[in-house]
Image: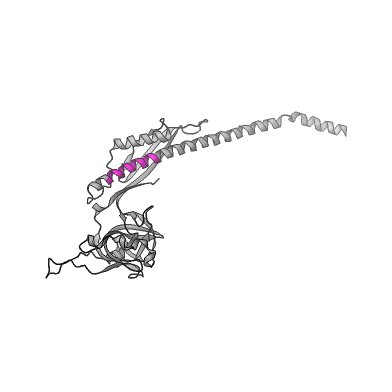
Amino acid sequence: MRAVIGALASRLRPERGAVAVFVALGMVVLLGFAAVAIDTSAARRDQQVLRNAADAAALAVAMECAKAVAADMAANPTATPATDCPVTAATAKATADRLGSDNAGSSSTVKPPLLQGQTVTVTVEADASRPIPIGPGKVRMTSKAAWTTTIGYTASYPLAISYCRYLQLPEETPYHLASEPNGLELLPDRQEISPADWTGSDTCDGPTGSLTFPVGSVMTLVDDSAACGSSSAKDRNVTGQAFEPVTFAARTCVASSQFGDVTSWPHGGYEIVVPVYDEVHGNRYHVSDYLGFHVMGVDPDGGLWGFSTGPVDPALGTPMPSVRLTT
């Protein structure tokens, strides 16, 4: 037995230290993976920093474009809004450089922003901050932001109507009898905006083609701290709910005082602005235009009656700039 054990021991002696070799080789592989992980983590941090800088710069330049157009629209409300950014390249670069430095550090480089139509493109570049340099030594991120400026209105009554209903309310004006040109003004035929006079679906040819709406009007959410006011803008969405019949007392916005002193107009009443929607996506209603409506009274179900005064004058609205990231 001793002879057998001795023979086995003699065979094992030459293989002493083999484990150490495998451990050393394994450590090399593990260190390689650790280096890649550290480098990847640093690269992602660099990318996030530059992404924040590029996003901020693109949004800032886009907002400058939108505000410049808003100023032009305020000065010339009947003019066609510009679809190209009026901001100069030098002004855009100064803004992008400042935002890039604030968010990515002074060592970053911001390429001159590209102003193309209603889109702004900003690219920010910086040296990689990786402790173990693997891959390119530069990090570059690009962001795009779109801008727009539209006319917005604050409605004194949180109501929106469909485009089909809009077509059913032709513009009207008070008139005099031909036999009494200097007599009292007479009101046009009564028009209504309420759930009682239009409860089913309707189809019409809208701005984007044939449209079918299941309801004739919707109640929109009122602005914060406002009793009845509701702001919106063309080519944007408002959130609303179907206009359901309500009792007179349940709708505070139809209180008679809401429509002013009847002696303040020769024919009494109060003018309101009503958004007109042409698309519905769930509880989102796309505003395509605005209708002026002269309210002469209210219905028990919360509706209004009076007469349409036609499309709202752009001079009465407020230019509203808007920006969003696209990439």
Q: Residue at x 26, y 45 (%)?
A: 71
In front: 151, or 121? 151
Q: Which residues are magenta?
A: 55-70
The colour mode here is one colour
> 67 or 16: nearer the eye?
67
Residue 285 position, x and y percent, is 36, 59
Furthest residue to the right?
Answer: 1
Q: Position of residue 205 (x, y in %)?
A: 29, 64
Quadrant where the N terminus sits is top right
Q: Is residue 64 covered in magenta? A: yes
Task: Give the main secondary structure of the magenta stretch.
Answer: helix
Please name the residue shown 24% across and 55% down the image: 313
**What residue sits 59% from the left and 33% below the top?**
31
Look at the image and tell me in which quarter the C terminus lies: top left
Residue 236 is a magenta residue: no
Closer to the camera in the image, 56 or 74: 74
Residue 134 or 166: which is nearer the viewer? 166
Compared to 148, does 162 lie above or below? below
x%, y% of residue 326?
Answer: 39, 47
Number of numbered discs present?
0
To which quarter of the image does residue 271 belong?
Answer: bottom left
Position of residue 189 measured from the top left corner of the image (x, y, whole percent): 23, 69
